[in-house]
Amino acid sequence: MPHERSRHIQPRMEAAAKLWPVIGLIGPRQSGKTTLLTRLLGIQNVVSLDDLETRTEAATSPRPFLAKITPPLVIDEAQKAPALFDAIKYSVDRRKIPGSYFLTGSSSFSQKIGIRESLTGRIGLFELHPLTLSELERKAPSTRNFKMKSTEPARFEIESWAQRMISGGMPVPAFMRSAQERQLYWSSWLETTIYRDLAPFIPGKFDPDIAFGLLNRMVRVIEDGEIPTLKHFSQPARTVRKYLDAMCEIFLLKRFLCHESGTGKDIWYFFDSGLLSHLLKNTSGEAATLGLCRHFLMNEISARHGFMGARFDRTYYKTARSDLVDFVINGIPFKVVPSVSGITNQRGWQEKPLLSAMRKLNSKTGFLIGPTNKIELPKKGVGLIPWSYWS
């Protein structure tokens, strides 16, 4: 099928399946988790707990349920039957066979303490992100390290990046040729995610209008060139955080913390630039480009850390007197620039918050990430790298 692509995380998962009896694969709904396990890793036995009858059986008779199916077994949306995790624990403790169970989930497995205890010491856990640019273009992963030493030219043209950041990395809409088809897909996806996936994570009464209202407010903030914080919402902070945190649990949003050297508050990103593009509709301009680029780049960096087995803390930098610096990676600050003028005649203005961050972070270098194929990697000072540097 046109939207099927090999995934860079696959080799790590194959290696883990030779070590761990249980492999967990979490990530957004319809991000390709089941496809990766069945079509790419070749696991044939699959059950989905999205099916009510199957879910009821797994929840009420978990051990007989597992006994009927010979491993290796994929259990899709496994978190919907928490009782199943103790049954899996019992099974793998009796027969410690690597690669017995592959569990997928569109929400975190750590929601309940009992589930965490059942999985401890028995699971290799992975997160599947939307497709990266190199996966979309069927290219091998980049070999660049995270120490900003590689002067290898960018592998993708600016135009390719710009096109892909609009359609995003979700396997189905990323390959739809019609903008109208993508709009229909995302509308349906968002309805399902809010009404079916989000509700169980909201303590007390769930109000979908609050959820949709918060998402629409986030889009308006992004249209102004900013990234949403609690101050941008009119509802009580406790309510806003409750809903935003729940959206993070189901991978709809990603939360970034301000680096400990800064004074900024928590900020939130959409998980995929394609969803943001859908919500922005036909909005154009530098602020919209900046928002889309930030989101697509967030996924590139997050996914690359994941398939390399590296930690990505998702931190940014800001003080009360400085503009936001988008990412802090290994103590180095990075700022996204949405236009050519930002790295030419306006470069000095764009560098100011980086220089402030470099002093606070005690970093000799900082980098602008812009629409260029040029790479500047100074030993000291502000350098320049393309949007697609990590792709």
Image (cartoon, rainbow, N blue to C red):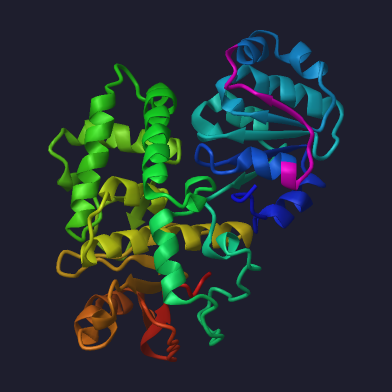
Quadrant of the rendered image containing residue 376: bottom left
Give x and y (percent) for residue 21.
78, 37
Looking at the image, residue 55 sits to the left or right of residue 326; the answer is right
- The vertical placement of 17 against 365, above or below, is above
Quadrant of the rendered image containing residue 370: bottom left
Give x and y (percent) for residue 114.
58, 24
The residue at the far left in this view is: 234
- The vertical placement of 207 against 106, above or below, is above
Give x and y (percent) for residue 309.
63, 59
- What residue lies at 67% left-to-right and 15% top-to-bottom? 58
- What residue lies at 22% left-to-right and 34% top-to-bottom? 213
User: Along the line of sight, which residue is nearer the eye, 120 or 338?
Assistant: 338
Q: Is residue 32 magenta?
A: no
Q: Is residue 46 magenta?
A: yes
Looking at the image, residue 297 sits to the left or right of residue 286; the answer is right
Region in magenta: 39-52
- What residue lies at 56% left-to-right and 22% top-to-bottom? 80
Q: Is residue 229 visible?
A: no
